[in-house]
Image (spheres, rainbow, N blue to C red):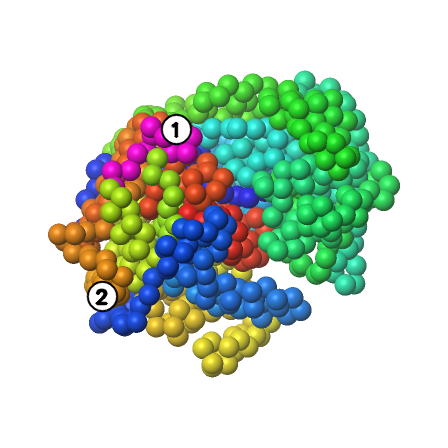
Amino acid sequence: MKKFLSLLLAAAMVLSLVGCGDNADAPVTSGDEGNTPPAVDNVEVNTDYVGPDWEAIDAMDYDAQSDAVYEHNLGEFAAAYATAKEELDDTDKRLALMAVAEAKMLESGVFVPIYGDGGTYAMTRVVPRSATTTSWGLDEYKDYTMLVTNELLKSTDRDALTALWSEAATADDYVASAKQYLADNGYTLTDTYNALNGYDLETWDIIATSYTSDSFFIAPTYTGLLEYDLKNVQQPAMAESYEISDDGCVYTFHLRQDGKWVDQQGREIGNVTADDWVASMEHVADNNDALGYLMSSDGGCGIKNYDAFINGECDFSEVGVKALDDYTLQYTLEQKFPAFITMLGYGCFAPLNRDFYMSQGGTFSADGVEYTPGDYGKTPANIAYNGPYTITNYTAQNVTSYAANPLYYDPDALGVQAINFYYNDGTDVLRAYNEAKAGTVAACGFNANALELAKTEVPDGETETYFDLYHYTTVNSATTYCGWLNINRKAFANFNDATLGVSPQSEEDRARTREAMNNQNFRLALAMAFDRGAYNGVQVGEDLKYASLKNSYVTGAFAQLANETTVDINGESKTYPAGTYYGVILQDQITADGYPIKVWDPTADSGAGSGDGFDGWYSVDNARAYLASAIAELANEGVEISADKPIYIDYPYGTYSEVNTNMANAYKQSIEASLEGKVIVNLVGFDDSLNLQYAYYRNTYGSEANFDISTGSGWGPDYGDPQTFLDTIQSYGYMCKNLGIY
């Protein structure tokens, strides 16, 4: 399951943490004092610069065009990343080599990281750490362990509860101590969790979707082999135990024998057996474009013969997933892949009840017939459930309701018996705040409008304000939203409706923009001209405008070396001690390459170090230096860039949303001021969120991407290894479609 994320879709979901804000000017400043990137006096000009041969490229088929554009812009990353992926025996050296490869990717400037989910003020009734915070897989969306109080949690009590979590040895220990603390301090628990979200759903088939906007709704309905608990430890779920072969290629799971499948009404329809994962893999193969990359040897764990089956080279019986008996399941990999076990929380490893699927008219190509899903996944009535909840009501863009599954194998684990998600399109900037105060929803984020009120309004019977009593700062996630540059733009209107998102650029403008977008110095000028703090401040306010900023694709603290490791940094052997963060190595490579990008601050997080919470890219001086070099190089291609003859770039945004409009204007103001009018941002408006998504998010191919710059989508990890991010930018990688290729 690809965790391909849309900021606009997620905005209302994450407790309205990124709600609408006031109009914001984008000041021309250097960035966050003390965390600014290093300065450069000038950037070397390649006097022999030659851009892509567009005449030859345009004569190629689309895949060949993509290959040529990819090699021109990302060839150095591709070579470094291939070296990293070839290292399978030493996982620490592999991690270090991946950091080296990411440095090459960031230096290319094909995108700039912006921020993650978090780093905002909020108030809540959800007990902290009462659900997993593991950043990969779908367990974070299952919510069933969540403890929810009837009363808003005071900041001091949240801190005390978080301390109890740190002290607890196990998840059960924390739940017990948290419940006792709440009772001792006058809190009462509710069995219902109500929240806002802004997601539109296309399918209820968890295996056939690559969108978080679908999996968010479906995750509570199924249980996989293993799940992460609220201490972020992987625990038995449908599998009671497992073994790994000595060569690391064979995983054997022993299933529990009390798992049940039910229909939407909670009526039993069968036992959960090993064949449910065999059927699942057959369905994954039939939906290979959605989820198959995680099974492939090229971009995932490498299930034995999966690629061969997809290519028509073998029967499914030779694929490495077997039901040894009703309750013994075995996966075999082509080669060792240590992160395999961390992948099991994803939709592509969800079980599928074969009989129910076929009763909906579904077929498998593995059976030698033409694949069709039939009615499976069309509505909540067209799926089977083995998870903690069933769907009791679904009304698009209104409400989705869940009730406890009466035959769930572990009913005592459910912290809440019912869940309701209410659709929020973001047009009412105070809806989340007002409903959280009233108790209609459990929580809200303080957008700029709400923050102003929260700092002045006093709850009945209290003497302090809502902000002083209840606020906390949300933890930044591993998800990274980015500003993507289209380096091979084909679409100048929406692929689903050519009357929407029509570009104002002339044919000459389009040709000049394409030349510029394929110049590394021009792209880096755009990246460094982007005041990400001002942009973020539109939605979260000045206080926290830097808190959620990210400076790399893979979060710097995402992984650490387990052992002392030596790696080559530009010809110099450098030894890193055990415990060294990925971000340290990433920064060292960028520094050695001479780029003024700061991706790691060793003093952050109380000295532990972090790559988040500061702007390590934005610098007006650096942006202008890179642009000057780009202007000189592009002159070799006959492209003049000046204030009188600027480069035009199209930026799609939602006119229906105040926050989206303000963010778009903040981007435009930042770029045009920083680059002195030599780049002009065309704001291309959409009055409907779904149509906007078709411009930048719901496209299958890069040729359908209707923008020059898009800041609305990002990636969250599929499993616990940096490869889960970097694979998306290799050739044919999933996020390459945001670059206009593949």
Observer-nearest of 651 and 724: 651
| Residue 452: % across, % down | 25, 35
Whole-percent x and y of residue 135?
53, 48
The three-letter code of the residue at mark 1 reads Asp
Image-based side of 260 in relation to 438, left or right: right
User: Of callouts 1 and 2, which one flags the residue occurring earlier in the amino acid sequence?
Assistant: 1
Q: Which residue position is annotated with label 1?
A: 497
From what the image shows, is residue 577 above or below residue 730?
A: below
The residue where tag 2 is placed is: 632
Could you tell me which residue is drawn at 50 percent across and 63 percent down? 78
Amino acid tagged 2: Ala
Q: Residues within 10 Å of mark 1 (few under 14, many from 20)?
A: few
Q: Residue 563 lies in magenta, yes or no?
A: no
Calculate the distance from the C-alpha at mark 1 to the C-alpha at mark 2. Answer: 39 Å
Identity of the residue drawn at 49% across and 39% down: 700
Query: Is 161 on the left-hand or right-hand side of 35?
Result: right
Find numbered disc 2 in the image and state the secondary structure of the residue it sits on.
helix
Residue at x 77% of width, y 43% of height: 316
* Residue at figure coordinates x 72%, y 29% from the top left: 363
Figure quadrant of residue 37: bottom left
Which of these two is toward me, 626 or 185? 626
The magenta-colored residue range is 494-505
Give the quarter of the figure containing the N terminus.
top right
Say if residue 657 shows up in the picture: no
Magenta segment main secondary structure:
loop
Disc count in the image?
Answer: 2
